[in-house]
């Protein structure tokens, strides 16, 4: 606040119109943003449940203490962490490799850019259904593996392979999206750096290691953090493919949150879990801002 | 924004000869085909209901549309499709309208505390909506909006990313035309309608396409806000169908998946440049 109402850009504008233009956002932000946010902070200190006759009781930090001692919550956190650690290196490497492959001009380049990006526009529900079919014990994937005399696990039905199977689908479906972000980063690198390097006899590998990768650092950090935040929210895949099983081995944090809120109707506890997830996400978003805001040194 | 958009245009400006490109085709071609194989499976199984989910048997045929017919006859797929289309249309229209007005005001710095407002928007942008799953549900319950179309539309009528996109775009627009119109005695509303809105068309197209794709594929909120079968959108209807007696009816489920994918694929192929420029504007924020 404290900014003067009329600055050079706003000459002659009527404040009334401006407020009228701004009001839809203010209303929506208040009603569907701030209000739920504040209300659920309050709910997280109670044992509110719509299916119980008695009203909500104030339980203080009880729900938060319960979360810290809830093995199921820790197991969900562990599954989510495994998901993040097990997908992001592969997704990033594949996305970067694809971006490097489709950056230079060649005939039919647009076909490949479009094709690799394609999975990103299709609904996760659809992708999950397709992969559930492919992963079926006597499905097409195992048919192929059997023909190659490789082991044929039960994939989504086996506690040891269910989460990795979902992770593999995520790597497949997300890399095209991050490929485009890497392409933007690659295009932003000044061409003349490569010209100068070539004149001094640098090989393609030298150029990659000493120009491309260092200058791509901000893009890389952006991709890493955005993907981490996205991976913390994995839900539809689990809902469609495994419903958290077998043996809760694919229960992610958001899926656990969903179960607590909409199967057990334990909304006070679920609100507390949502706040914990919020703090975790916020910490990562803060990291993202810092990572992106950092200037890069050009050493040519 | 425009710099990034121009930089990653899908069409190569001056393509080299086919011969020089062959090397890349030799290894990128098989890779792309492998990556698109799941979609080929989806389409093949949807057309070969007797294949029982086997790619080899499906490829051999015979192909027919019986899965699609069964889908529209026995399940309420037509209804889900209509719901998805209606909700997506409403959300897109509202999104474009609110992004245009709010983004314009913020871009022209016409309100006190413009920086604070913008910061609020950027903060909302960073936060995935899923963390609001429980609180939003509670608010919708209090407003008696659960299990209505309004629950599928209203919370998504204003989108922080869209507002931010328009604001950035307006910052780059010359103000002279607006000032000239004001000198001529035009009112704020007339200036907005007749001068600013036509200039904003490109960015509003990006907003419309992005919000269509996001909304058409949206799953979590339609799942928790709506209970009745007649209000279900396509992704929710499909996901719940897959957990009924149809759970291994692959021809049936893949026909539904194909129907759910065709609109987004069409929009993507028609407007891929707009989609990528919106994506890159996000990356460059």
Image (cartoon, helix red, strand yellow):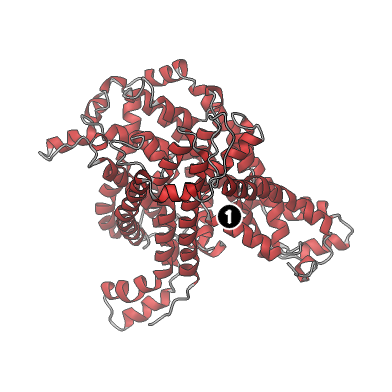
Instruction: Answer with left or right where residue B79 lies relative to residue A246.
Output: right
Please identify the quadrant where the C terminus of chain A is shown: bottom left
Instruction: Answer with left or right where residue B147 lies relative to residue A227.
Output: right
Q: Position of residue A141 (x, y in %)?
A: 22, 36
Disc tally is 1
> What residue sits 37% from the left and 54% below the top?
A109
The chain carrying label 1 is: B
Snapshot quadrant of residue A183: bottom left
> What residue sits 44% from the left and 74% below the top?
A190
Q: Is residue B58 above or below residue B24?
A: above
Snapshot quadrant of residue A204: bottom left
Q: Position of residue A89 (x, y in %)?
A: 31, 58
Please identify the quadrant where the N terminus of chain A is shown: bottom right
| Residue position marked by numbered label 1 in the rendering | B124
> What residue sits 54% from the left and 63% below the top?
B285
Pick the residue in front: A259 or A60.
A60
């Amino acid at each position: 606040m404290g900014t003067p109402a009329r600055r050079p850009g706003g000459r002659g504008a009527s404040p009334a119109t401006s407020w009228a233009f701004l009001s839809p956002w203010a209303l929506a932000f208040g009603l569907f943003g701030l209000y739920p946010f504040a209300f659920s902070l309050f709910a997280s200190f109670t044992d509110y449940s719509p299916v119980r006759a008695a009203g909500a009781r104030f339980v203080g930090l009880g729900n938060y203490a319960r979360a810290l001692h809830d093995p199921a919550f820790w197991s969900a956190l562990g599954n989510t962490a495994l998901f993040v650690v097990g997908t992001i290196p592969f997704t990033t490497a594949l996305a970067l490799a694809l971006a490097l492959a489709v950056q230079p001009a060649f005939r039919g380049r647009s076909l490949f850019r479009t094709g690799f990006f394609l999975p990103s526009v299709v609904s996760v529900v659809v992708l999950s259904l397709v992969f559930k079919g492919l992963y079926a014990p006597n499905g097409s994937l195992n048919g192929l593996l059997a023909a190659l005399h490789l082991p044929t696990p039960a994939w989504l039905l086996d506690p040891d392979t269910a989460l990795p199977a979902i992770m593999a689908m995520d790597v497949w479906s997300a890399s095209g999206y991050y490929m485009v972000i890497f392409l933007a980063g690659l295009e932003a690198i000044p061409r003349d750096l490569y010209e100068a390097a070539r004149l001094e006899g640098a090989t393609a590998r030298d150029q990659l290691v000493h120009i491309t990768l260092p200058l791509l650092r901000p893009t890389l950090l952006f991709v890493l953090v955005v993907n981490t935040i996205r991976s913390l929210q994995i839900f539809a895949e689990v809902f469609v493919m495994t419903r958290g099983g077998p043996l809760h081995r694919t229960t992610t944090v958001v899926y656990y949150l969903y179960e607590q809120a909409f199967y057990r109707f334990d909304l006070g506890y679920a609100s507390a879990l949502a706040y914990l997830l919020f703090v975790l996400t916020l910490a990562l978003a803060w990291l993202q801002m810092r990572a992106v805001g950092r200037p890069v040194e050009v050493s040519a | 924004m425009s710099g990034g958009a121009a930089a990653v245009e899908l069409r190569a400006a001056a393509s080299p000869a086919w011969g020089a490109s062959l090397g890349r085709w030799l290894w990128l071609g098989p890779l792309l085909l492998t990556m698109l194989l799941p979609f080929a499976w989806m389409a093949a199984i949807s057309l070969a209901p007797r294949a029982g989910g086997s790619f080899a048997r499906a490829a051999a045929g015979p192909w027919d549309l019986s899965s699609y017919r069964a889908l529209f006859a026995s399940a309420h797929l037509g209804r889900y499709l209509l719901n998805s289309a209606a909700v997506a249309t409403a959300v897109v229209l509202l999104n474009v309208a609110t992004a245009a007005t709010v983004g314009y005001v913020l871009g022209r710095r016409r309100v006190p505390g413009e920086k604070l407002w913008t910061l609020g928007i950027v903060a909302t942008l960073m936060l995935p909506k899923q963390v609001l799953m429980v609180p939003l549900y509670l608010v919708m319950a209090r407003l008696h909006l659960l299990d209505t179309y309004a629950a599928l539309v209203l919370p998504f009528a204003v989108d922080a990313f869209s507002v931010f996109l328009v604001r950035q775009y307006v910052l780059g627009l010359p103000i002279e035309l607006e000032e000239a119109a004001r000198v001529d005695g035009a009112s704020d509303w007339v200036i907005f309608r007749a001068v600013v809105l036509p200039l904003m068309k490109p960015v509003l197209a990006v907003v419309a396409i992005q919000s269509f794709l996001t909304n058409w594929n949206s799953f979590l909120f339609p799942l928790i806000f709506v209970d009745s079968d007649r209000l279900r959108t396509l992704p929710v209807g499909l996901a719940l169908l897959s957990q009924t007696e149809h759970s291994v009816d692959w021809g049936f489920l893949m026909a539904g998946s194909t129907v759910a994918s065709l609109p987004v694929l069409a929009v993507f192929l028609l407007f891929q440049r707009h989609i990528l420029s919106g994506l890159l504007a996000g990356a460059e924020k």
